[in-house]
Image (spheres, rainbow, N blue to C red):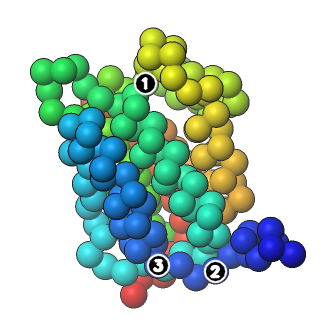
Amino acid sequence: QEAREVLQPQRLQLDEVVRDCLLRHLPRADGLRVDLGARGLEAPVQVLAQRALLEGVLDNLIDNALRYGRPPADQDARVTVEMAVEAPGTVRLSVLDNGPGIDDAQRQRLLTRWAQGPAGATLRQGAGLGLAIVAEYARILGATLSLEAGEEGRGLRVSLLFQASVG
């Protein structure tokens, strides 16, 4: 019974869920000297989703970005959570970093269980499940998941496209 209630979609304020997740990760980001920020949270946006799954997606993506998405030591590390209304009725939720990024060939492979990128293998951290979990949660949430190069071709941008209503 309780599991069914957790998985029941509800109208959620996406901007509020994003803020809550950012606040949870700020102390770790500060400790790692990573500028963790957000863009596009000014307008309230509602999505039909399960809060636990949405938080699971954000927690995994922010954790991955903090762990693997840092640039060389001589550059400032940034992780940004961005919410952007793409068209009426759709919103894109992205987590971007300015780290080494992942080449095209590896991006799709990382969505499968136990697969790790070069940084994960080098750091000997994680089990290669984070993005596979994100992919499954995105499927359950009815969101479209994409991985692409970050801003100016650096780092990684992981995005979910949701059906949404603004206001």
**Horizontal placement of 133 versus 15: left or right?**
right
Q: Residue 40: give x, y in percent of width and height.
A: 28, 66
**Horizontal placement of 41 versus 73: left or right?**
right
Q: What is the spatial separation of the Cα atoms under label 3 and label 2, in whole angstroms?
A: 10 Å
Q: Which residue is mark 1?
A: 102
| Amino acid under disc 2 | Gln
Q: Which residue is mark 3?
A: 13
Q: Crowdedness of circle 2 by 10 Å Cα count: few (<14), some, many (20+)?
A: some
Q: Which residue is mark 2?
A: 10
What is the quadrant of residue 166 in the picture?
Answer: bottom left
Q: Residue 16: give x, y in percent of width and height.
A: 40, 74
Query: The N terminus lies in which quarter of the figure?
Result: bottom right
- For label 2, the SS is strand
Looking at the image, tell me whether mark 1 or mark 3 is earlier in sequence order: 3
| Amino acid under disc 3 | Gln
Q: Is residue 124 above or below residue 76?
A: above
Q: Which mark is residue 78?
A: none
